[in-house]
Image (cartoon, rainbow, N blue to C red):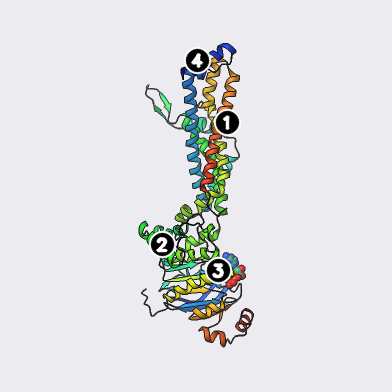
């Protein structure tokens, strides 16, 4: 490893191409932390946005008018406003309204940090789209299949869990994957509230080293690879979920 | 309310059903004894499907009474789960669960609904698949089976719940002529085993052979009924005669 690190230091000395996060341990740790934060934030948001989608789509089928209206209101609000404004709203508006707690140094700090707010905000943002995606999938499940389950004595919840969702899931996987890829790209917005994710750490590095061009190229490639891996995994998953002789 | 086997297992009295303004059933009454096989025939749109779907509460009714083993179906407090444990149903379009194999289709309801032990359920599911002559197809998905094979899985799936009566709604209507026979044979086997069956069918030869009683419906009423011999030879009502002359 050290040989490689030294090579990049020489590269900088000979050509001026400065990639400090490869030869400098401090910058390297910053970049690794940023990368891990991006991955972790993405995973948390993927998970919760899918949960929100599943529950929201179930509630949209409720027989209570107000439940359906509430879910629709949520979807409209989060689809028709910019995610950056949502993030600021959560962090600065709701965040400052919440009580503060005493921290380890005897000072006051907010109950939720910037990472938590980014996770909440982006989960709700992507979740709104996921509700609609799941809803369309549920509508594509034939009524007759659901009826067969009813005739066998399945309860409403059992039908949703065992029949409707698994079938709807397969129908919507392409749309869902699309939305989840967008979500991963949108995690860069967390930069705006100083979540130390990849873009934020890159910014720290270019401020210290004045190597904006190199960092921009690196960032573009890093996201290209990260999202590429996700897309590859999703495509494999889509193939694995395929039912023989169906769809 | 207690029910004993000398009473009708399924008893409809003056059943009325409409979809909005459209009156589909206009006072239907019929009794089915334990072990009976009855066939309902009649022109398209006469309400045959609606009639049998009322028996397992897939459709609700506006007026009249439907008793299944003494339990009133037309009751807002009806325990649908208890009813559906007693009444099985097989559909025209099979309606199998496409994401489950044949075996899983058959054992799913016993495990989920009856809370049967998985191994026991699998054992009986395999026996049922054998019974409908589909050995070797246990792990096939519905999409990999022919129509006739899917319909036999659907019959096995219904049998797995050990119902007391099974409703069949034109279960051969979507099949190729070559595969109709295998499904009819499966139903015939069931009838011979003493299963109570209520069938809607267009297969007159089959109805004649297996039915204990035939009901002819038109525009939401039972126009005429009787044992197959009398029914097919001495139909009285002009509507029955016209229908039979077209179909035979
Ligand atoms: N869910 C529904 N909503 C509104 N009308 C319905 C519904 N189901 C059935 N009908 C109407 O009720 C009438 C009887 O339908 P049903 O399916 O019971 O007829 P059928 O005798 O089974 O006909 P077929 O032989 O074509 O299957 C038809 O006019 C049909 O259009
Ligand atoms: Mg019908």
Q: How far apart are marks 1 and 3 (CA)?
A: 54 Å
Q: Is residue B124 above or below residue B198?
A: above
Residue A158 versus residue B177 in the image, above or below: above
Q: Badge 4, how many Cα within 10 Å: few under 14, some, many 20+?
A: some
Q: Residues within 10 Å of mark 3 (few under 14, many from 20)?
A: some
In the displayed structure image, the side of residue B3 where residue A174 appears, left or right: right
Q: Which of A137 and A94 is in front in this view?
A: A137
Residue to which mark 4 is pinned: A6
| Distance between the alpha carbons at the discs numbered 3 and 4 | 75 Å
Tell me the residue that label 3 is attached to.
Answer: B179
Q: Is residue A175 left or right of residue B100?
A: right
Check the residue under mark 3 and report the chain it is in.
B
Marks 3 and 2 belong to one chain: yes
Q: Residue B212 carries which label?
A: none
Can residue A168 be seen? yes
> Given contact means CB atoms under 8 Å apart, are the residues at marks 2 and 1 in contact?
no
Task: Write down the residue under mark 2.
Answer: B126
Residue A23: where, in percent of width, then height?
A: 50, 17
Q: Which residue is drawn at 42% across and 26% down?
A: A109
**Local secondary structure at mark 2:** helix
Mark 4 or mark 1: name the one nearer the start of the chain. Answer: 4
Label 1: which residue?
Answer: A224
Of B118 and B5, the residue lying toward us: B118
In the image, B36: left or right of A192? left
Measure the C-alpha gap from mark 3 to mark 2.
Answer: 22 Å
Above or below: residue A17 compared with residue A231: above
Please tell me in which quadrant of the rendered image residue B237 appears. Answer: bottom right
> Which is more foreground, mark 4 or mark 1?
4
Disc 1 under 8 Å from ligand 1? The reply is: no
Do labels 3 and 2 touch, CB within 8 Å?
Answer: no
């Amino acid at each position: 490893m050290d040989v490689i690190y030294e090579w990049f230091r020489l590269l900088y000395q000979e050509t001026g191409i400065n990639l400090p996060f490869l030869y400098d341990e401090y910058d390297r740790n910053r970049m690794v932390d940023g990368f891990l934060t991006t991955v972790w934030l993405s995973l948390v948001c993927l998970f919760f946005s899918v949960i929100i989608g599943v529950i929201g789509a179930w509630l949209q089928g409720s027989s209570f008018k107000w439940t359906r209206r509430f879910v629709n209101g949520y979807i409209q609000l989060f689809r028709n406003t910019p995610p950056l404004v949502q993030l600021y709203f959560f962090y600065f508006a709701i965040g400052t309204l919440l009580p503060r707690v005493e921290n380890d140094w005897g000072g006051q700090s907010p109950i939720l940090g910037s990472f938590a707010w980014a996770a909440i905000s982006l989960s709700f943002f992507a979740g709104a789209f996921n509700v609609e995606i799941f809803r369309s999938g549920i509508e594509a499940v034939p009524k007759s299949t659901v009826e067969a389950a009813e005739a066998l004595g399945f309860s409403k919840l059992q039908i949703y869990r065992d029949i409707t969702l698994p079938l709807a899931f397969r129908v919507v996987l392409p749309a869902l994957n699309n939305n989840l890829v967008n979500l991963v790209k949108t995690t860069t917005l967390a930069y705006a509230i100083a979540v130390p994710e990849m873009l934020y750490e890159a910014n720290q590095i270019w401020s210290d080293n004045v190597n904006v061009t190199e960092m921009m190229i690196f960032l573009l490639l890093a996201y290209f690879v990260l999202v590429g891996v996700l897309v590859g995994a999703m495509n494999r998953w889509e193939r694995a979920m395929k039912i023989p002789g169906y769809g | 309310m207690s029910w004993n086997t000398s009473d009708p297992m399924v008893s409809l009295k003056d059943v009325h059903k409409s979809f909005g303004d459209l009156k589909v059933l206009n006072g239907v009454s019929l009794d089915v004894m334990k072990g009976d096989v009855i066939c309902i025939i009649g022109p398209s749109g006469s309400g045959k499907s609606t009639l049998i779907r009322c028996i397992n509460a897939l459709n609700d009714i506006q007026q009249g009474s439907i008793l299944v083993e003494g339990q009133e179906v037309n009751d807002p407090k009806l325990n649908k789960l208890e009813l559906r444990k007693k009444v099985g149903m097989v559909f025209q379009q099979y309606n199998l669960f496409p994401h489950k194999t044949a075996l899983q289709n058959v054992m799913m309801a016993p495990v989920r609904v009856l809370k049967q032990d998985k191994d026991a359920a699998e054992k009986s599911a395999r026996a049922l698949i054998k019974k409908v002559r589909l050995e070797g197809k246990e792990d096939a998905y519905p999409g990999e089976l022919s129509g006739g094979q899917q319909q036999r899985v659907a019959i096995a799936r219904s049998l797995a719940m050990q119902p007391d009566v099974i409703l069949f709604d034109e279960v051969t209507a979507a099949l190729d002529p070559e595969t109709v026979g295998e499904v009819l044979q499966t139903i015939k086997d069931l009838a011979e085993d003493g299963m109570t069956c209520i069938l809607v069918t267009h297969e007159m030869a089959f109805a004649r052979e297996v039915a204990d009683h035939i009901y002819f419906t038109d525009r939401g009423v039972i126009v005429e009924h009787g044992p197959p011999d009398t029914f097919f030879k001495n139909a009285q009502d002009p509507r029955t005669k016209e229908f039979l002359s077209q179909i035979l």
